[in-house]
Amino acid sequence: SLNNYLMRCEKCKKEEPATKEELLQKKELLAEVESLVHLGNWRLDLKSNILTWSDEIYRIFGMKPQEFEANYEAFLATIHPDDVEYVNTAYTASVERDIPYDIVHRIVRKDGEVRYVHERAKHDKDKNGNIIKSLGIVQDVTNTVLIEQEIRKSLHEKEVILKELHHRVKNNL
């Protein structure tokens, strides 16, 4: 009856703050976890060209939200000049072919520091099957990439030394 309905509505109103509190707690937990692993999330609405970044992405890119015009072109402007075409081609192909976007590339922060990021994304479609937005993550992988580069450099140096030793031993026999 009407009284039962009104009582349920009052109960919902009383429970609503708890739901908002739970959502706030989950949002804070997500922000903490993102900060720990240097990983942020993003969403690009392809119709409006509005790009939304989590706070951690702003930290990774070394900027504040008000310093960034949140659209795809502004994102491309943060990418290392040698990587812009690669990133744009990979993302465009992922949207056109509805394939995952999964790349590592460089960014240049405002202070000039070059960082390496790993990006992954998937796409959402409307009821007609058209891709309307992309949802993705960015992880700062600079330390990992630099360590891998050092290992490759060290291995190359060892190969050169071994080849030289092999050459000398072979010539002395």
Image (cartoon, rainbow, N blue to C red):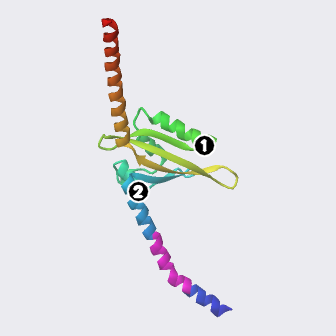
Along the viewing direction, whichever of 8 and 37 lies nearer the viewer? 37
Magenta highlight on residue 22: yes
Along the viewing direction, whichever of 165 and 40 lies nearer the viewer? 165
Q: Amino acid at mark 2?
A: Glu
Residue at 70% of width from left, 52% of height from top? Answer: 128
Q: Circle 1: is it few (<14), some (14-19), or many (20+) Cα within 10 Å?
A: some
Looking at the rendering, which quadrant does residue 74 occupy? top left
Q: Position of residue 140 (x, y in %)?
A: 39, 46
Please state, as top left, top right, bottom left or bottom right, where the N terminus lies in the image: bottom right
Q: Find residue 99 and name its label.
A: 1
Q: Position of residue 107 (x, y in %)?
A: 39, 41
Could you tell whether 49 is left or right of 74 in the image?
right
Residue sitting farthest toward the right: 128
Kindly report the distance in space between the C-alpha atoms of the residues bearing marks 2 and 1.
25 Å
Q: Position of residue 81 (x, y in %)?
A: 40, 34
- The magenta segment is 11-23
Looking at the rendering, which quadrant does residue 150 occupy? top left
Magenta highlight on residue 148: no
Q: Amino acid at mark 1?
A: Ile
Q: Position of residue 106 (x, y in %)?
A: 40, 38
Q: Is residue 60 above or below residue 103?
A: below
Callout 2 secondary element: helix
Residue sitting farthest toward the front: 173
Residue at 47% of width from left, 78% of height from top? Answer: 18
Q: Sequence-wise, which precedes: disc 2 or disc 1?
A: 2
- Is residue 65 in view? no
Look at mark 2 in the image and give the residue it sits on.
Answer: 34
State the predominant SS element of the stretch in magenta.
helix
